[in-house]
Image (cartoon, rainbow, N blue to C red):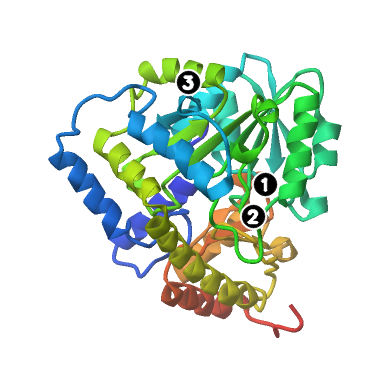
Amino acid sequence: MHTSSTLKAAQTAAALRDEGHSVIDLTVGEPDFDTPQFIKEYAWEGLQKGLTKYTPSSGMKTFTHAVADFYKGQFGASFGPSEAVASSGGKQALFNACCTLLNPGDDVLIPKPYWVTFPEIVTFCAANSVFIDTEATDFVLTADQVKAAITDKTKLLIINSPSNPSGRVIPPSEMRKIIEACVERGVYVLTDECYLFFAYPPGEVFTSASLPAEVREFVCVAGSFSKTFAMTGWRIGYTIANESWSKAMIKLQSHSATHPTSFVQYACAKAMENASESMAAVQSMLAEYERRRDWLIPALNTINGFKCGMPEGAFYAFVDVRSLLGDRFKTSADVADLMLNEAHTVVTDGTGFGAPGFIRISYATSMENLQTAIERLSKIFGTRSATAA
């Protein structure tokens, strides 16, 4: 396994900052918002109630019931609390799902570009990553691409929509076709929905948990509170899968993390029960992300050698810098290094996402930081008119 390139870039930014440099960190996908105050108060309420002991490995009943009720209220999804399992963050949810499904030698389909952790989980399970190139469809996976990639060795497809790193969103109708194509061939689907609610208007928020039960038999939804409620450090997530798969994940988790923190489960359960206030907080964050996106993407496209499409979700700009490659820059990593050393602006090279020639910029930071970053990059690379971009 390889070190996470996003976390490695963030560590580089921290080291420069410790040296006294004015660093603009555009690497890690971590909301710059604080956790909503009412969720903090729920956690304190849980502590006051004495919720500091072990919980079932599946999670507290109040938590799993709240997940089921929340999805029913938001999406009309119909599944039981026994199909929901609490996990220590979205990453453990993904690991639990893969470790209980994959055998050595199984093939796992992963669309490119991908989140850096997906192929590492597959490697951990001694399975094989089989990549689907989606550049021809502007980084939006299609059912036809999936059908063409499935073989007798294919066991699982991993999907992330809205996508990290591209910010692209698979339309709900196409997502249904993709999953149905997998079900027809007996292929399982793991949908990483950590950016579920960060789809910009007029896009539709879609979860695979709302599909019919016979289709969901082959689907595991990995959810997280890290992005949705700006709770990255709280380490709380969940899976939604059929009872058999869920029981296997509970068994595995009983020998690893045991369960996520008890009073954090309580706080998240209360947040889901209080859906109106929670979703108002989410919409407030989404509106600010949209404001930043609408300013940043046109600004990036005025920089010489930069080309970036408009993302429909998440909070990333995935910038094509291949026109810069040649004598001065051999790779996109060279471009990122120049940005680091001369502009003290830290981004993530696209190679770690399976897309050499690109860089990922997170706009989960202040507008002031984004404006300063653009000023610094414009001085280094020069600019062209917005119309020419």
- Residue 113: mark: 1
The residue at which mark 2 appears reads as 166
Q: Gap between marks 2 and 1, in whole Å?
A: 7 Å
Nearer the observer, 193 or 323: 193
The residue at which mark 3 appears reads as 249
In percent of the image, x 76 and y 82: which residue is there?
388
Nearer the observer, 260 or 389: 260
Is residue 35 placed above or below 302 in the rendered structure?
A: above
How many C-alpha atoms fall within 10 Å of the one at disc 2: few (<14), some, or many (≥20)? many
Q: Amino acid at mark 2?
A: Ser
Q: Amino acid at mark 3?
A: Met
Q: Residue 86 vs residue 286: left or right?
A: left
- Residue 39: mark: none
Q: Residue 349 vs residue 274: left or right?
A: right
In percent of the image, x 29 and y 39: which residue is there?
266
Instruction: Identify the element where label 3 is drawn.
Output: helix
Expressed as whole percent of the image width and height from the top left, the position of residue 251 reads 43, 15
Instruction: Identify the element where label 1 is drawn.
Output: loop
Expressed as whole percent of the image width and height from the top left, the position of residue 379 reads 55, 80
How many C-alpha atoms fall within 10 Å of the one at disc 1: few (<14), some, or many (≥20)? many
In percent of the image, x 68 and y 75: which residue is there?
304
| Precedes in sequence: disc 2 or disc 1 | 1
Task: Give yes or no for contact between labels 2 and 1 (Cβ–Cβ under 8 Å).
Answer: yes
